[in-house]
Image (cartoon, rainbow, N blue to C red):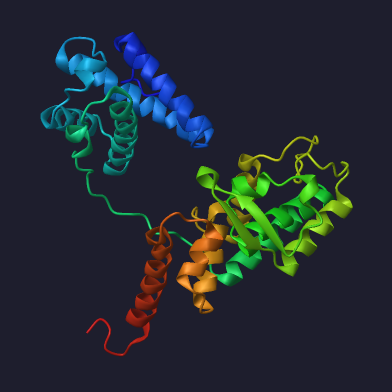
Amino acid sequence: MSENANPLLISPAARDALQTWLAHQSALKDAAENTIIAYRGDVTEFLTFMTLHKGDTQGLGALAKITISDMRAWMASTRSGGVGSRSVARKLSAVKAFYRWLAEREGFEPTAVLLARSPKFQKKLPRPLAEDAARALIDCVETQARAPWVAARDVAVLTMLWGCGLRISEALALKGGDAPLPNSLRIMGKGGKERVVPVLPAARAAVEGYLALCPYPQEPHAPLFRAIRGGALGARAVAQVMADARMQLGLPATATPHAMRHSFATHLLDAGGDLRAIQELLGHASLSTTQAYTAVDTARLMEVYNNAHPKAGR
């Protein structure tokens, strides 16, 4: 939690309301634990600021009277603390979500908060890997593991990310009962959204190869991908495997497990895949999120054009 967030400066009623909202987000909206932690910190920071800004602990009645001027003061204070535009936008989004819920619960109009404009920021485009780099990474992780079954496991995980477009959390959430992998998997993604993902023969073969070597029993409710001591394989361990491999291959720091998912989408687009279908496969709630990949593709085409066209640079 930020040092600017002090729960002791928040009224008991506001603390209770925040806790109830967070419980609602966790239970009914199926928000991830990291999301709940971020929400708690962002909204607590906001409520702390309002107490200091107004000179008094803000109860629910006072919070209902927040003005546009108050919102601008909070955002200016946040920016002056060295927080970037992207982070300010995230904090504002959390506050707005809390206020929508609180206004409905308490029966007031949250217009001043909801009208606060998010600062503009440059969206980071996905950084996919070229197809040969993705293959090289998978080949590399196979040679760097300490045991054959670990090598097979790492290959299987990365193949699932690249071949099925899974998030690392989704791949690591697979259970022993999911194997042998069928032709398609039902994946529970962000926000409890379910989608069906085709499983390529290469991904099925990689998982079968891993299970044939894994020293731990394949139990229906146990993690499919095991750590060295038999527990659940963690995302940090996979990230470290990727980091070691990219150093050997001289690839940039953007070559992460998530980059394999980006590569899945970009390579489908390169092959003529339909944007709407790719949105469904990735589990994006908004098509605009998937459209970022077209920007990547266009940027790459323009780079090739500028380097190769006889009139470029003249």
Residue 292 placement: quadrant: bottom left
x and y percentages locating residue 304 in the rendered image: 39, 79
Residues 242 and 4: in front is: 4
Give the residue displayed 29% in from the left and 22% down from the top: 106
The answer to whether 223 appears left or right of 132 in the picture is: right
Q: Which residue is outermost to the left?
A: 69
Q: Where residue 98 appears, x then y in whole percent?
A: 34, 30
Looking at the image, can residue 256 be seen? no
Image position, residue 303 (x, y; %): 36, 75
Image coords of residue 263 (percent x, y): 54, 64
Residue drawn at the location 58% of the way across and 71% of the way down: 131
- Looking at the image, which residue is at 28% across and 25% down? 46
The quadrant the N terminus occupies is top left
Quarter where residue 63 is shown: top left
Quadrant of res 89: top left
Q: Is residue 59 above or below residue 185?
A: above
| Residue 280 seen in the current view | yes
What residue do we see at 88% from left, 42% from top? 217
Q: Is residue 243 above or below residue 232?
A: below
Q: Nearer the viewer, residue 280 or 222?
A: 280
